[in-house]
C-alpha cells in the first residue's frame, strides 16, 4: 500500500506509511513516543519554514514598500524556534522581557525585536533598552508617560502606538482584542493625547501605528477595516504634527484549521489583501508607503506541531453525554493544552500505529488533570483503543506549551524537532526536581533553648535548608 500524505490540520510532512505508521518528516511518531515518552510535542521544521516563507515572500510579491514579518513569540517560543525564526528572515514580537531574552539568547539582534504588552513596568522598559530592543509598542497613555521618563534617563527610544481600532472580529470573545472597550490599546479619541506625550519628549521617536484585532480570525474584511483606521490615524498625525508614519502593523491573528474541514484562510491571500488595502489607502490619502509589519503567531507555528499522548485507562460513560460512550483517559491534558477548557477548542486525534484502522468508536478524550473541564476532545471518532496506544493530536503548536502549567505538579512535556528523517530534542521534559527547584522550605528554627524546638523534629521539617535540597528521600526525575 502507498504512503498517503495527510491533509490539514496535519503538518505538511505528515504521512501514513505502507505499514500504517503515522510519520512526520519521515520520522515514525511511535518511535518518538518510545524514545522520549509521552506526552511529547513534535515540531515539524518544514511546516514552520513554509508558513514563515508564505508571509515573507507574500509581502515581497504584493507590497511595493518595505515589509517585515514579526513572529509572535507568545504562540510558542524556545531557543530553537527563535533561531529558526531568525534563519527564515523573521523578526520577533515579544510580549515580555522573558520572550525578548530568549530571542537575544538565540542570537536575534535587539533591533529585530519589538516589545509589546499592556502592563510594562518602568524596570521592564529599562531592561528592554539594555537588551537593545528596537521598538516599544506603547499600549496606553500611562505607559507612554513612563516611557518618556525612561527615555530621559538614557538614549532615544523608538515608539509605535497600539490603537484600539473599534473593529469587531468574528472569534471567541476571550481572544477578540479590537473593540473600543478592549483592555488593549489606546482608544482612538485619545490619539492626540498620546501624540502630545511623544511630542513633549525629544528622546521619544515616533515610528508608527499598530493594532491587533484578535486571534483565530478566519475572514479578511476586519483586517481591511483595521488598516483603514490606522491610515486615518496616520493622516491625523501628519496634519496635526507633520509626522510621517514610517511603520504600520495590523497585528497578527490569522486562524488555522484544527480539524478536517475547518476553514483555513490562505496566508498568501491574507497578505495580498492587507498589502492592497495599505497601498490603496495611502494613495487615496496622499501618504507615503510605510513599512508594513505582519505579526503572525498561530498561523506560523500552530500547524507545525503535533502532540502525542498515551492512553492510560478507559471508563464507560455511566450516563448519556453527547454521542460518546466512554472516557478515554490520556497522560496529558489541560496542563499542556488549555485551549479546549478555556476557549472550547475542538481537537481531533489519530493513533500513531495502524492509523488507517476504521474509526468506529465515539469517545471523550479526557485529560489527567483534576478538573472536570479537562477533556481534550469531546465526541471524537477513534478506532478501538487499548491502554498504551499513542494518539497524535494535530494543530498543537500555538498557545499550548506557551500557556502550559505544572498544575497538579505534573512536569511539562518535551519538544522534539523533526526534519529530513531525523529527530532532535529541542526542549527537555521538565523534571520533578525542576518543580521543586525554587522551593526553600521553612525558615531555620530559632536557636534551641531550654524550651526551643526539638532539633530532630526541626531537621525532618526542613530537609532543604539543613542538608541541601531533597535530602529526605531520593527524587525521581
Ligand atoms: C499584539 C499581538 N500581535 C500578534 C499576535 C499574534 O496573534 P496570532 O497568534 O493569533 O497570530 C497577538 C496575539 O493574539 C498579539 O496580541
Ligand atoms: N491564547 C489564545 C490566543 C491569545 C492571543 C494573544 N494575543 C488562544 O489560544 O487562542
Image: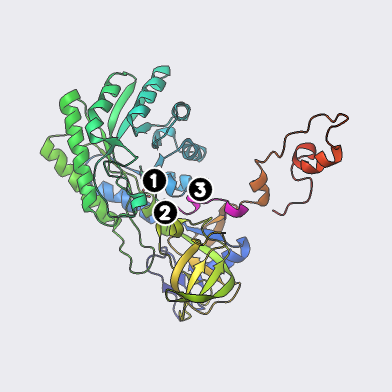
Q: Quadrant of residue 347?
A: bottom left
Q: Vertically, is 466 above or below 43?
A: above
Give 359 or 365, whichever is nearer the viewer.
365
Tell me the residue at 20%/46% (across/down).
225
Along the polypeptide, which appears first: circle 1 or circle 2?
Answer: 1
From the viewer's perspective, tell me whether residue 328 is left or right of residue 170: right
From the viewer's perspective, tell me whether residue 78 is left or right of residue 463: left
Say which residue label 3 marks. 80
Report if the beta carbon of the residue with label 1 is closer than 8 angstroms to ligand 1: no
Say which residue label 1 marks. 71
Q: Quadrant of residue 460?
A: top right
Give the dominant element type of the magenta stretch: helix, strand or loop: loop
Describe the element under mark 3 as helix, strand or loop: helix
Q: Count residues near mark 3 (Cα–Cα under 10 Å), then give few for <14, some for 14-19, many for 20+.
A: some
Q: Nearer the viewer, mark 3 or mark 1?
A: 1
Which residue reaches farthest right?
A: 450
Q: Nearer the viewer, mark 2 or mark 3?
A: 2
Along the polypeptide, which appears first: circle 2 or circle 3?
Answer: 3
Return the x and y of residue 192 as percentages of the image width and height. 23, 27
Residues under numbered marks 1 and 2 in contact, where contact means CB atoms less than 8 Å apart? yes
Real-space Cα separation, disc 3 to disc 1, in angstroms: 13 Å
Q: Vertically, is 357 above or below 455?
A: below
Magenta-highlighted residues: 397-413
Say which residue label 2 marks. 301
Amino acid at each position: 500500500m502507498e504512503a498517503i500524505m495527510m491533509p490539514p490540520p496535519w503538518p505538511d510532512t505528515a504521512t501514513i506509511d505502507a505499514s500504517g505508521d503515522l510519520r512526520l518528516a519521515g520520522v515514525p511518531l511511535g518511535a518518538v513516543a518510545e524514545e522520549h515518552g509521552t506526552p511529547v510535542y513534535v515540531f515539524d521544521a518544514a511546516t514552520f519554514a513554509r508558513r514563515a516563507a508564505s508571509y515573507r515572500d507574500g509581502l515581497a510579491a504584493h507590497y511595493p514598500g518595505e515589509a517585515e514579518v514579526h513572529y509572535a513569540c507568545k504562540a510558542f517560543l524556545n531557543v530553537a524556534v527563535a533561531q529558526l525564526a531568525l534563519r527564515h528572515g523573521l523578526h520577533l514580537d515579544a510580549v515580555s522581557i522573558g520572550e525578548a531574552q530568549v530571542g537575544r539568547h538565540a542570537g536575534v539582534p535587539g533591533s529585530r525585536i519589538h516589545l509589546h504588552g499592556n502592563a510594562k513596568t518602568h524596570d521592564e522598559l529599562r531592561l528592554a533598552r539594555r537588551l537593545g530592543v528596537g521598538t516599544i509598542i506603547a499600549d496606553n497613555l500611562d505607559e507612554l508617560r513612563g516611557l518618556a521618563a525612561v527615555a530621559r534617563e538614557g538614549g532615544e527610544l523608538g515608539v509605535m502606538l497600539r490603537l484600539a481600532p473599534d473593529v469587531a472580529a468574528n472569534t471567541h470573545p476571550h481572544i477578540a482584542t479590537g473593540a473600543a472597550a478592549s483592555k488593549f490599546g489606546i482608544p482612538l479619541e485619545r490619539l492626540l493625547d498620546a501624540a502630545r506625550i511623544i511630542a513633549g519628549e525629544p528622546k521619544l521617536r515616533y515610528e508608527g501605528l499598530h493594532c491587533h484585532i484578535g486571534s483565530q480570525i478566519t475572514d479578511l474584511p476586519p483586517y481591511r477595516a483595521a488598516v483603514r483606521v490606522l491610515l486615518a490615524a496616520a493622516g491625523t498625525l501628519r496634519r496635526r504634527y507633520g509626522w510621517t508614519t514610517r511603520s504600520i502593523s495590523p497585528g497578527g491573528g490569522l486562524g488555522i484549521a484544527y480539524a478536517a474541514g475547518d476553514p483555513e484562510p490562505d496566508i498568501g491571500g491574507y497578505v495580498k489583501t492587507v498589502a492592497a488595502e495599505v497601498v490603496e489607502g495611502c494613495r487615496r490619502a496622499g501618504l507615503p508607503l510605510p513599512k508594513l509589519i505582519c505579526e503572525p503567531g498561530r498561523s506560523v507555528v500552530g500547524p507545525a506541531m503535533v502532540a502525542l499522548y498515551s492512553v492510560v485507562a478507559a471508563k464507560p460513560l455511566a450516563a448519556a453525554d453527547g454521542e460518546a460512550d466512554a472516557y478515554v483517559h490520556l497522560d496529558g491534558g489541560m496542563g499542556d493544552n488549555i485551549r479546549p477548557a478555556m476557549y472550547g477548542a475542538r481537537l481531533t486525534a489519530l493513533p500513531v500505529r495502524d492509523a488507517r484502522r476504521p474509526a468506529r468508536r465515539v469517545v471523550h478524550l479526557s485529560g489527567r488533570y483534576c478538573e472536570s473541564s479537562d477533556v481534550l476532545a469531546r465526541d471524537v471518532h477513534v478506532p478501538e483503543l487499548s491502554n498504551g496506544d499513542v494518539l497524535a493530536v494535530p494543530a498543537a503548536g500555538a498557545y499550548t506549551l506557551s500557556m502550559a502549567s505544572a498544575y497538579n505538579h505534573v512536569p511539562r512535556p518535551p519538544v522534539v524537532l523533526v526534519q529530513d528523517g531525523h529527530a532532535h530534542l529541542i526542549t527537555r521534559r521538565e523534571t520533578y526536581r525542576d518543580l521543586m527547584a525554587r522551593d526553600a522550605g521553612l525558615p531555620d528554627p530559632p536557636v534551641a533553648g531550654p524550651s526551643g524546638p526539638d532539633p530532630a523534629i526541626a531537621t525532618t521539617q526542613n530537609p532543604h535548608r539543613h542538608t541541601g535540597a531533597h535530602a529526605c528521600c531520593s527524587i525521581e526525575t
